[in-house]
Amino acid sequence: AYFCVERHPRSLFISSIQVRKGWRGKGLGRAMMERIEAMALFQGLNAVELWVQNMNRRAISFYRYLGYRFVAQRGSNYLMRKRLDRWG
């Protein structure tokens, strides 16, 4: 499992995140997302964003479960964002 992020002016952008098929469903994805959100808060940022393909229903459901919402569409991709609250 791995992730790659980029710092934007007000958000941390997830450019890539992946969990190998045999390791899915074991909490690695959630742990990585929690780590990314903690990194964003530590850097004083107020959101995490990512693009997801509109056909990737499993990923979309996962991100929505974690509190991410649709904010834009470009072609066959959705931009999803989660606003972060420093005080939890």
Image (cartoon, helix red, strand yellow):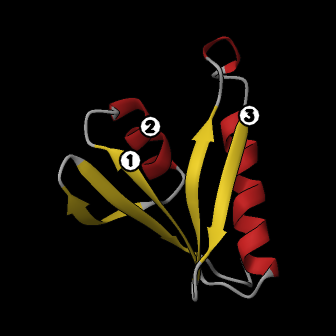
Q: Earlier in the sequence, mark 3 or mark 2?
A: 3
* Mark toward the viewer: 2 or 1: 1
Q: In the image, what residue type sits under mark 3?
A: Leu
Per the image, label 1 sits on a secondary structure element best described as strand
**Closer to the eye: label 1 or 3:** 1
Q: Earlier in the sequence, mark 2 or mark 1?
A: 1
Spatial CA span between label 2 and label 1: 7 Å
Q: Is residue 24 above or below residue 60?
A: above
Find disc 3 in the rendering and name its residue. Answer: 28
Residue at numbered disc 1 = 52
- At x 71% / y 74%, what residue is drawn? 40
**Does residue 83 lie above or below 19 as drawn?**
below
Q: Quadrant of the N terminus?
A: top right
Q: Are marks 2 and 1 in contact (CB under 8 Å)?
A: yes
Give residue 4's position: percent from left, percent from top. Answer: 67, 52
Question: Of 82 and 79, which appears nearest the observer?
Answer: 79
C-alpha separation, residue under disc 1 versus residue under disc 3: 18 Å
Query: Pointer 1: residues within 10 angstroms few (<14), some, or many (20+)?
Result: many
In the rendered structure, are the residues bearing label 1 and label 3 in contact, judged by CB atoms less than 8 Å apart? no
6 left or right of 70 in image: right
Q: Against 83, is 58 above or below?
A: above
Query: Percent position (x, y) of residue 38?
Result: 78, 67
Residue in the picture at 72% in, 24% down: 26
Taking 72 as reference, is 81 left or right? right
Q: Amino acid at mark 1?
A: Val
Crowding near pointer 2: few (<14 within 10 Å), some, many (20+)?
few
**Which quarter of the rendering shows the C terminus?**
bottom right
Hey, what amino acid is under mark 2? Ala
Residue hosting label 2: 59
Residue placed furthest toward the left: 75
Residue at x-position 21% and y-position 59%:
74
**Label whose residue precedes the other's in the sequence (1 or 3):** 3
